[in-house]
Image (tube, rainbow, N blue to C red):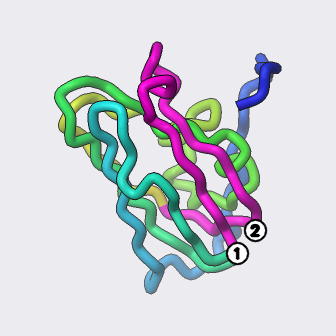
């Protein structure tokens, strides 16, 4: 991640009410002690997806992908789950969010102290 940090809150873009989330692709991401599985997530641009995040460890982790979440169109009822470009999960918790991804390559990491340095990072590629 780059050296500059924005102090401006990241506001998610809300998907149009007409977006059909009834038959979406499903992508599962596990957060564990210093790892994401899968580490590299592949999604289709413009195709609605349900992202299912599960923290399988006992301690807290997050899935920080500020540029990805800022570009995506997020279902209105899920927008509060994404705060400042990340999803925070306490140990043993899970959450699903529905969104429409935008083409690009995005960095992901866990912003908890030292977690990224210990390998908790990855990439989202949207084609």
Membership of 32 in magenta stretch: no
**Residue 57 percent coordinates (x, y):** 20, 34
- Earlier sequence position, callout 2 versus callout 1: 2
Residue 18 seen in this snapshot: no
Location of mark 2 (residue): 103
Placement of 54 over or under 127, stated as above or below: above
Q: Which mark is on residue 127?
A: 1
Viewer-proximal residue, 107 or 67? 107
User: For numbered disc 2, what is the local secondary structure?
Assistant: loop
Between the C-alphas of marks 2 and 1, the distance is 5 Å
Viewer-proximal residue, 34 or 61? 34
Residue at the image position 57 percent from the left and 42 percent from the top: 108
**Residue 56 percent coordinates (x, y):** 21, 42
Residue at the image position 35 percent from the left and 32 percent from the top: 34
**Residue 5 percent coordinates (x, y):** 77, 20
Where does the magenta region start and end? 98-127
Q: Is residue 32 left or right of residue 52?
A: left
Task: Locate residue 52: give its quadrant.
Answer: bottom left
**Residue 88 percent coordinates (x, y):** 42, 32
Viewer-proximal residue, 38 or 80? 38
Placement of 47 over or under 109, stated as above or below: below
Residue 126 seen in this snapshot: yes
User: For numbered disc 1, what is the local secondary structure?
Assistant: loop
Q: Residues at badges 2 and 1 in contact (C-beta under 8 Å)?
A: yes
Which residue sits furthest front?
118
Quadrant location of the C terminus in the rendered image: bottom right
């Amino acid at each position: 991640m780059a050296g500059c940090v924005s102090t401006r809150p990241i506001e998610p873009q809300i998907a149009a009410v007409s977006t059909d989330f009834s038959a979406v692709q499903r992508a599962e991401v596990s957060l564990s002690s210093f790892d994401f599985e899968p580490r590299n997530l592949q999604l289709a641009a413009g195709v609605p997806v349900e992202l299912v995040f599960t923290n399988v460890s006992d301690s807290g982790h997050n899935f920080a992908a500020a540029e990805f979440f800022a570009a995506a169109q997020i279902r209105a009822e899920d927008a509060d789950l994404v705060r400042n470009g990340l999803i925070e999960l306490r140990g043993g918790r899970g959450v699903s969010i529905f969104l429409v991804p935008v083409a690009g390559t995005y960095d992901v990491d866990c912003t908890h102290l030292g977690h990224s340095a210990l390998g908790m990072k990855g990439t989202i590629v949207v084609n």
